[in-house]
Every structure is written in C-alpha cells, then in structure tokens.
Image: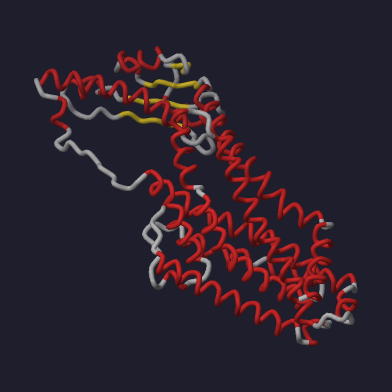
Amino acid sequence: MRNISIIFRKELKDMLRDRRTIFFMIVFPLILMPVLMTAIPKLFSNAEKKQQDKILNVAFVGAEYSQDLYQQFLDNESFIVYSEINENEIEQLILDDSIQVAIVISSNFESDIESMNQAPVSIYHRSADDMDVTQRRIGKTLDSYANQIRSIRFDKLNLDRKITDPLNISFHNFASGREQLGKMAGGFLPYLFVIFCFMGAMYPALDLGAGEKERGTLETLLVSPANRLEIMLGKFGVVALSGFVSVGLGFTGIYIAISQFITTNETSQIFDVLTSILQPETIVLVLSLIIPIAVFFSAILLSLSIYAKTFKEAQSIIGPLNILFFVPVIVGLVPGIKLDIITASIPILNISLATKEIIAGTTDFWLLAEVYTSMFLLAIGSIYFATKWFDKESVIFRT
C-alpha cells in the first residue's frame, strides 16, 4: 500500500499541474455549467422577446372583403399593414424582407361568414430562424377575430357556448411534485454526470498513460521499487478520483445554476421541490452510483491510454467512446423505459434509470441492489482487465 500511495501522490501532483485536466475536472462542471444553464435560457428568452417586440410589415390582400378583420390588424400597434399589394408580388416581397407576412382573403369571405361556413384565410411568411414567433403573432390576431365570429354565431342560434365542449375533463395527478419533477430532471441529470465523469477522467488517463510514454518517464516508474500492479493502481486511483470529483463539482454547479435561475414566485415553488429532492440521502445515493461508473471509465480509459503509442493516438482511440457510452444514457431518456430486472443489469442505462428513480423518490431497493451488483462486477472486471493489460510488455513498450 505504501508504494501505491507514493505513486498516487506523485501522479496527483502531475495531474494538478495540467491545465486541461483542471479545466475538465473543475472549471467545466463548477463554472461553465451554471453559466450555460442560466445564460442559454436567458438568451432564448431575449431572442423570443426581440421577435415578439419587432414591428412586422404585413400585407393584407382583400381588405375590401372584410373590413372587420382588416381593422383588427390595423389596430394592432405591432403591425404596419399594407393593403395596396397584389397577390402575385407577395413571394418576392417576403424573400426581399420588404414584408414579413401576407394575409390573403377571398372575395366571398363575408358571405362565408354570414352563411356560417368556414372562410379561407391564406397566410404567407418565411419562418426559418424566428422560432415561429411571427406565425404565432398573426395567429393570435386571427384567433381573436375567430372568437368574435364564434360568439356571434352562438347568439344567432341561441346556443350555449358550452355545447362545443361535450366533456368537462378534470385531471387528478396523484404523483407528488417531487415525483413529477424527478422523472423529468432525473432522466437528464445522468447524461450530465456521465459527461462530467468521462471528461474528468479522460485527460488524466491520457496524460498518465500515453503522455508518460511520450515524455519517456514511464520507464523511470517501471524501474522503481513499486511493481506494475502498484503502479497501475496508483495511476488508476488518480484517474478515478478525477472523474468522481468532476461529478461532485457538477452537482455543485447545477445547484448554483438552479439557485441563480430562481427569481419568481412561480419558480420558487419549483426550487422548493428541488430543495426537497437534493437531500443528503439522495445526493449520497446518486454519488454512490457514480463510483462504479468512475471506476469503469478510469480502468478502460487508462488501459487504452497505456496501449496507445502517442497522446494523439490515444485521443483518436478514446474519442469514439463518447458516443458508445452516451447512447445508453440517451436511451434512458426515452419515455416508457423503466428500471426492471432486465434494464437494471444493462451498464450505464441502469445508472440513468436508477438515478431517475432515486430523484423521484420511487426507488425499489431490490432493483437498486441489482444495479449496484452489476456495476460493481463490471468495475471489478475492468480493473482486472487493466492490471492484466498493464502487465503485458507488448502493450507498455508498443512501438
């Protein structure tokens, strides 16, 4: 154990000197995540508000056929309405951005309304990057007009407006706020944790394996009193610690982001639910699930790094693993896939589903025990593989 401890401390010091490792282990989860989780929603909100506040140039073709509808658009201060445009000019004007929307009604519009038929309205616009805000704004004015016509028709026919709603449906959800929010957030959080764990372990693994090969310092360790198993376990401990710390800091970053995002009374209720979710026992259970993942990632990444001849080759080998490891987590986001006897034994997917159950407070401890068992067996197997791999001369001195 003494030799392992010496190797561990030596590699830990080397790792903490590496800027890339520090970034992916500390800066990325602790600082970047709060920035992303607060800045991106705010960016989307500001972009949508900008589109909502933008004055739209609207061509209204057929204004003489419905003065009432035409007047509704004239009264809207966010529209500049043009009624002198011909229908055959619309496409070019929209493509030139001279106008943003064109509304065309037919000559029999009023007669259709009077005879209680559907009156056709054609809307032309160009919507590619405005989040369909333009369409919604025009639709809101048309809906307002349609509601007025609907009320007039009900009055003419002397009908109760409720006649069009034959069912009075009320939903009663017995799921608690924690369960509802937990099922939504619980599916997404494992995705972040796998990213944190993988990225946090990847660069130390690259540096302590292929990096040492390139620098020519691996041979120095091999002639030390420590045997190969002790050297490998010392390196492995640093890589696993890096992955686990990255996830822990990710938890902290997400909590900071949520705290910053909560501003209104409505969202403070969500924060209360989140606070009830992030209890010590919940955090301990979730982090305990990350331990075997960190062990598994660390053993595999370190093995591949030792196998590679250069740092660049190690990166090219490890890069595709991102997709391989993230696919099971994405599958865990699919509605209807639950933790059962089968899914509890599928690596990484079981972590995703178990995290969702833990956060929602609906944990089946027998299934959770199966998840722990399968993941720790996988972790032990990966360590065994790494030790055997590190013991091969053809791997360590591969040229």
- Residue drawn at x 30%, y 14% is 68
Q: Is residue 48 above or below residue 301?
A: above
Give 309 or 234, whichever is nearer the viewer. 234
Q: Is residue 378 above or below residue 173?
A: below
Which x, y percent locates residue 257?
59, 40
Give 199 or 124, whichever is nearer the viewer. 199
How many numbered marks are there?
0
Q: Is residue 343 left or right of residue 235?
A: left
| Quarter of the image where the C terminus is located | bottom right
Which x, y percent locates residue 261?
56, 35
- Residue drawn at x 51%, y 61% is 329
- Residue drawn at x 49%, y 42% is 275
Picture quarter containing residue 149?
top left
Q: Which residue is the extreme one toward the front?
A: 2
| Quarter of the image where the N terminus is located | bottom right
Q: Is residue 168 left or right of residue 213?
A: left
Q: Is residue 84 above or below residue 212?
A: above
Which x, y percent locates residue 359?
46, 53
Which x, y percent locates residue 269?
44, 35
Q: Is residue 59 above or below residue 199?
A: above
Give 82 or 292, whichever is nearer the viewer. 292
Give 1 or 240, whichever is nearer the viewer. 1
